[in-house]
Structures are given as C-alpha cells and as structure tokens.
Image (cartoon, helix red, strand yellow):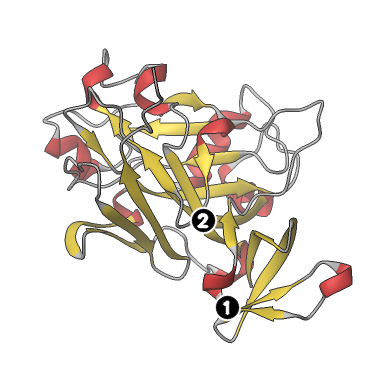
C-alpha cells in the first residue's frame, strides 16, 4: 500500500493511494477521495515523539558506478553522515539554490524508513525492522564541499534541499529493494539511470552496520546513496526522481526570495 501525508482544508491528513486518487484516513473525512492536484504534499513520515528527534543517516559513495564517476575506490565500510530532518520537504515543493552556487545537483536515492526499534540487528533479520520505502532527492551543493568522503553540513543540510516522497510504500509490497531501477529527469530529459543492485552496501548491511553502535527507532530514515549521472541544475529546473515500484518525486529549483533593504 502507498501512504502519504498531505495538507488539505487547513489540516494535515494521512492518506493512501486508491485508484489514482488520495483516500483520506482522517476519521472525520475517512474515505473521501481527492485528486493529486487538490492538496499540498508533505514528507510521508509520521511525526516522531517530541523527546526523540528523528535520526536521518545518509551514505556517501554507496554506488559502484558513482564511485567510478568520481574516480574513487569504493569504500571498505559505509561512509555515513547525519542530516537534519528540517531539510525535508514534500513532493512538488521548491528547493532553494543559493545565489553563489555554481554546482548544485540532485541525488536520486532509495530511502529506508525504520519500523521498529533496532539494535544489534543481523543482516539476515534486517528487513524485519523496515517499515517501508520512499524516494529522496538528496541535493548537494558542491561549492561548499571540503571532503568528498564526509560531506560537510553546508553541502547536505540546507533547508528545502531534501525532497522526499510522495509515497511511503509498505515493505511487504517491495519484495526485493535491491533490484529496483532509479531514474532522474531534468526538464523532461533523462540525466541519471541506475539500479539499487549496484549499491556497495545493501540495505541489510547498512542496518546491521548502524545498529551495531546505535539504536534506530521507528521513523528513522536511511538515505542509501545515488548512482552516477549527476549534473548541475540551475534555478528553474524541474527535477523528477523516480524509483521502480515506489513513485516519482517532483520538485523545482528556485532562487532565494529577495527581501527589501
């Protein structure tokens, strides 16, 4: 099943996909159908408890073809870095490109959402702890890069720079997340294609690795890296990141709003 969170009629609602429409799950409106263009799409992630911020863990150079694209040797252990959940925006929202940026590119990524508390999980059991999967676009601003292997905060944590969604697809509906095609288009032109089979560290390996030293909780997110084929996207670019069986995540790059002196 495909789940979403949307804003409509002055409130936030959970919804599911039903025959090409959104079916509201909010008790007062349960069963009401809405068109995709009638709502504001939000990240498809339920809020976490106020006393436990969401952990977002991202991978650098986790696709063999992307490592070759950068002329790097694939890593011998996961190259991970934290991201702030405040960078998340929803499907069809806008991402701000800094005025001084000369190289800002998308990164189409499979996002893994944890479903139950996980600590010291073995690879063989890892999928038991997955709630579902969604699509993320982990924009990078290379002008600020200091270290390819551990991107600094300004490269990967800017507000509006992590579109995610539109759907959270139940893990049970994705029989093998390691055999999914990924594709990115910019203004309708295909610029990136790949497959999750090319990951250096697959989903079970990543869950085993992270939970060997930290606890993952329901709602935590792992961004699993991107294939090769990234290109600079100027303001005005319409970017669509699509993963087979999960969905197509759209967003537009804009310049920052100028304020009056």
Name the front one of labels 1 and 2: 1
Residue 16 is marked as none
- Ranked by sequence position, the earlier of labels 1 and 2 is 1
Q: For the C terminus, which image quadrant?
A: top left
Q: Is residue 123 left or right of residue 147?
A: right
> Residue 10 at x, y = what percent?
74, 57
Above or below: residue 117 compared with residue 75 = below
Q: CA distance from mark 1 to mark 2?
A: 16 Å
Q: Residue at x 49, y 49 (%)?
A: 164
Which of these two is toward me, 138 or 122?
Answer: 138
> Residue 88 at x, y = what percent?
53, 40
Among the 4 quarters of the image, the one containing residue 210: top right
Q: Residue at x 64, y 39 (%)?
A: 220
Residue 35 is marked as 1
Among the 4 quarters of the image, the one containing residue 186: bottom left
Disc 2 designates what residue? 165
Q: Residue at x 26, y 12 (%)?
A: 146
Among the 4 quarters of the image, the one containing residue 119: top right
Above or below: residue 189 compared with residue 128 = below
């Amino acid at each position: 099943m495909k789940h979403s969170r949307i804003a409509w009629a002055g409130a936030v609602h959970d919804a599911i996909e039903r025959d090409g429409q959104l079916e509201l799950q909010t008790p007062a409106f349960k069963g009401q159908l809405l068109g995709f263009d009638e709502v504001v799409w939000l990240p498809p992630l339920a809020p976490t408890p106020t006393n436990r911020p969401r952990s977002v863990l991202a991978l650098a150079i986790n696709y063999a073809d992307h490592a070759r694209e950068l002329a790097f040797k694939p890593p011998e252990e996961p190259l991970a870095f934290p991201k702030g959940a405040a960078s998340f925006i929803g499907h069809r929202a806008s991402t701000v490109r800094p005025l001084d940026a000369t190289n800002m590119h998308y990164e189409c990524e499979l996002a893994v959402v944890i479903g139950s508390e996980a600590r010291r999980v073995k690879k063989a059991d890892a999928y038991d702890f997955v709630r579902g999967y969604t699509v993320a676009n982990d924009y990078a601003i290379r002008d600020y890069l200091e270290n390819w292997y551990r991107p600094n905060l300004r490269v990967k944590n800017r507000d509006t720079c992590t579109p995610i969604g539109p759907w959270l697809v139940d893990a049970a509906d994705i029989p093998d997340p390691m055999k999914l095609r990924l594709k990115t288009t910019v203004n309708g032109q295909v610029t990136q294609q790949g497959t999750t089979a090319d990951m250096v560290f697959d989903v079970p390996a990543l869950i085993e690795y992270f939970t060997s030293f930290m606890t993952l909780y329901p709602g935590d997110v792992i961004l699993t890296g991107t294939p090769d084929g990234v290109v600079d996207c100027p303001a005005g670019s319409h970017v669509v990141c699509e993963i087979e069986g999960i969905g197509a995540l759209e967003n537009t790059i804009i310049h920052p709003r100028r304020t009056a002196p």
